Image (cartoon, rainbow, N blue to C red):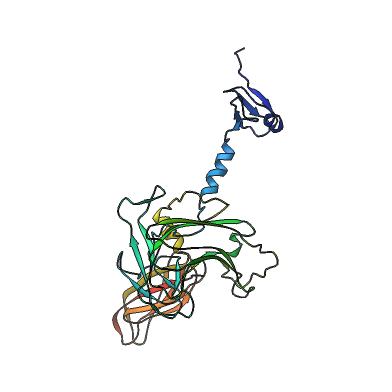
């Protein structure tokens, strides 16, 4: 019979109470974990088993609750390229998923900013940042804000969330960071909980805030479109810039290292909320006849509202779902026709 090698083994409690020799190995008979010892630490150090490793890997997939926290996806039409400014008022988007409001004073310019090639923050390569620029002072009715709305208010409930980001700029005054719980179109009135305040410096600085999110117990959630949001509120009556990079919201008390999603994945996630498509074709009609054409697109979170910009001929929408829209093309007289339109599909929260 061949020789067999066996290590000491015992229950989790027995292992916890045991201090092994330096380099000794014991086995936890309850969990299957291997423990290594150093002649000093009671219980030794448990090593990961396969089930632990699987849970660890799965727990990190999508750990950033923000979509587009790396600011890779620029909203179509927000500018031809980096450095193009967009004068914006309310509910404006320069980068996908990041909603800006200027406080109704009409002086905000949103710009995609670009880091020098090779720039790293915390050892993580980064390319773009979100810039809000206020070149003049105006008497704002309310303070300007920048926020991301995360689908479903149930995403974070009675647990700790940590928000981390890098910021810089020349805008003076104190910024505030808040968490907003919105309970849907016909639900309870939304709640806002302060997370903290910060000020800007001329160089990119990392800020981290943690909060135990209030419980949803007893809240009325109804009507759809409920969400939880992280909102930056800017100081009133200031000139200057506010730059934001590598924004992350995650469950837990610690700010972990920022990990970028592949840009293709980021853009796919963004398409649940906003898309821009082009439709059109050449066709023949008889007198007073029209054509109807179904155009499909990536499935969105709900049937979107449409903004149809006709560039040639006649195009009108007849019906829309979360994954497609039916357009009516054409008009009299009989003959060959071409119709084209650029269509914005908006399912933002």
Residue ID at (37%, 60%): 202
Q: Nearer the viewer, residue 231 or 336?
A: 231
Which residue is at the far left?
A: 336
The quarter of the displayed image where residue 154 is located: bottom right
Q: Quadrant of residue 337?
A: bottom left
| Total marks in image | 0
Q: Nearer the viewer, residue 173 or 145?
A: 173
Picture coordinates of residue 42 (x, y %)? 65, 30
* Residue 41 percent across, percent down from the top left: 62, 30
Work out whether residue 201 can be spotted: yes
Q: Is residue 214 above or below residue 308?
A: above
Looking at the rendering, in which quadrant would you find the N terminus? top right
Residue drawn at 40 percent across, 47 percent down: 123
Residue 248 seen in the figure: no
Asked if residue 80 lies left or right of residue 67, the reply is left
- In this rendering, is residue 12 above or below 276? above
Q: Nearer the viewer, residue 284 or 7?
A: 7
Quarter of the rendering containing residue 237: bottom left
| Picture layout, residue 119 above or below residue 219 | above
């Amino acid at each position: 019979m061949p020789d067999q090698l066996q290590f000491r083994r015992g229950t989790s409690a027995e292992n916890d109470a045991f201090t092994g020799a330096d380099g000794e190995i014991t086995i936890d008979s309850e969990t299957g974990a291997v423990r290594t010892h150093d002649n000093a630490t009671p219980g030794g150090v448990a090593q990961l088993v396969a089930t632990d490793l699987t849970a660890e890997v799965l727990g990190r997939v999508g750990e950033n609750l923000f979509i587009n926290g790396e600011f890779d996806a620029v909203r179509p039409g927000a500018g031809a390229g980096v450095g193009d400014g967009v004068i914006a008022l309310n509910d404006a988007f320069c980068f996908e998923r990041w909603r800006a409001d200027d406080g109704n004073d009409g002086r905000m310019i949103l710009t995609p900013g670009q880091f020098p090639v090779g720039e790293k923050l915390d050892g993580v390569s980064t390319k773009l940042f979100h810039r809000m620029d206020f070149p003049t002072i105006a008497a704002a009715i309310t303070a300007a804000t920048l926020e991301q709305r995360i689908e479903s208010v149930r995403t974070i409930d009675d647990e700790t969330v940590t928000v981390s980001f890098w910021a810089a700029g020349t805008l003076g005054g104190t910024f505030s960071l808040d968490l907003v719980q919105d309970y849907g179109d016909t639900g309870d009135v939304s709640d806002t909980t302060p997370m903290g305040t910060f000020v800007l410096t001329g160089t990119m600085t990392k800020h981290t805030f943690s909060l135990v999110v209030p419980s949803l117990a007893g809240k009325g959630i109804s009507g759809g479109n409920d969400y939880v949001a992280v909102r930056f509120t800017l100081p009133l009556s200031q000139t200057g810039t506010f730059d934001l990079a590598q924004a992350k919201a995650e469950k837990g008390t610690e700010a972990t290292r920022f990990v970028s999603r592949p840009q293709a994945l980021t853009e796919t996630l963004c398409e649940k909320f906003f898309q821009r498509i082009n439709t059109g074709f050449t066709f023949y009609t008889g007198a007073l006849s029209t054509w109807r054409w179904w155009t499909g697109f990536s499935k969105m979170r709900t049937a979107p509202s449409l903004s149809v910009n006709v560039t040639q001929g006649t195009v009108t929408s007849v019906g829309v779902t979360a994954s497609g829209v039916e357009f009516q093309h054409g008009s009299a007289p009989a003959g060959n026709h071409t119709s084209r339109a650029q269509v914005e599909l908006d399912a933002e929260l």
